[in-house]
Amino acid sequence: MPESAPMIVASPDDAEDIAHLRNRLAQWMVDNGIGQWVPGEYPSAVVAEEAARGEWFVWRDDLGALIAAVRVIWRDPEFWGADDDTEAGYIHGLMVAPEQRGRDLGGRIIQFCADYTLANGITVQRLDTAADNQVLRKYYAAQGFTELRETPLPPQFHGTTHVVLMEKSLTD
């Protein structure tokens, strides 16, 4: 199992950097024909509000550059609907800067999220990914997540039409 990532709780001051990283990744997805994120659909003002609630975590390098970020929430009715009554740590917006690829940062962030979820007394992790993104579906399956079902993407997002909901028990 990978060691946990050196993530820290983000503050609203991190919102611009988080939104900028998301826009960079969204543009890369658009340029590479991946229908998942759209540049500009997740404004820094929204990120700042979420960060103020303690939902975002960041990983910065020794020079202070943002190299990764993730959001963890305890309820997710927009994506999970009626299944939202299950206690879970919901992972959203897991991002690794493109220049950091190939270092298993994603695995370390998922482990951080698992540790954080368990520390909060919850034993289930959940996430979603674009239904047509086979690369991420396989990646998350390799990280121990099981696909539960496909559902329409909430209307405020536009990169794809459907997402796959995935779950992982942290007690296995």
Image (cartoon, grey):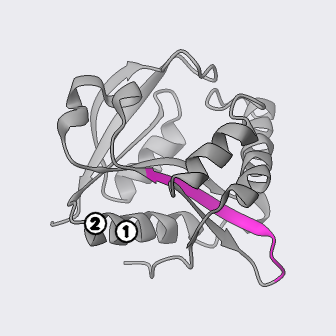
Q: Residue at x 45, y 53 (%)?
A: 72
Where is residue 122? Give x, y as percent. 22, 60
Labels 2 and 1 touching (C-beta < 8 A): yes
Q: Is residue 76 above or below residue 65?
A: above
Where is residue 164? Give x, y as percent. 39, 31
Kindly identify the amino acid type of the residue bearing the numbered disc 2: Asn
Horizontal side, residue 53 vs residue 165: left or right: right
The answer to whether residue 10 is magenta is no
Q: Nearer the viewer, residue 104 or 118?
A: 118
Q: Nearer the viewer, residue 24 or 154?
A: 154
Main SS class of the magenta portion in the image = strand
Q: Quadrant of residue 142?
A: bottom left
Q: Is residue 133 above or below residue 141?
A: above
The N terminus is located in which quarter? Answer: bottom left
Horizontal side, residue 40 vs residue 121: left or right: right
Q: Residue at x 43, y 78 (%)?
A: 2
Q: State the extent of the magenta-drawn residues as a range.
A: 63-72
The answer to whether residue 70 is magenta is yes
Where is residue 14? Give x, y as percent. 73, 59
Return the residue found at the far right: 63
The C terminus is located in which quarter? Answer: bottom left
Kindly identify the amino acid type of the residue bearing the numbered disc 1: Tyr
Q: Residue at x 53, y 15 (%)?
A: 155
Residue 120 numbered tag = 2
Q: Which residue is mark 1?
A: 116
Secondary structure of the residue carrying numbered label 2: loop
Q: How many marks?
A: 2
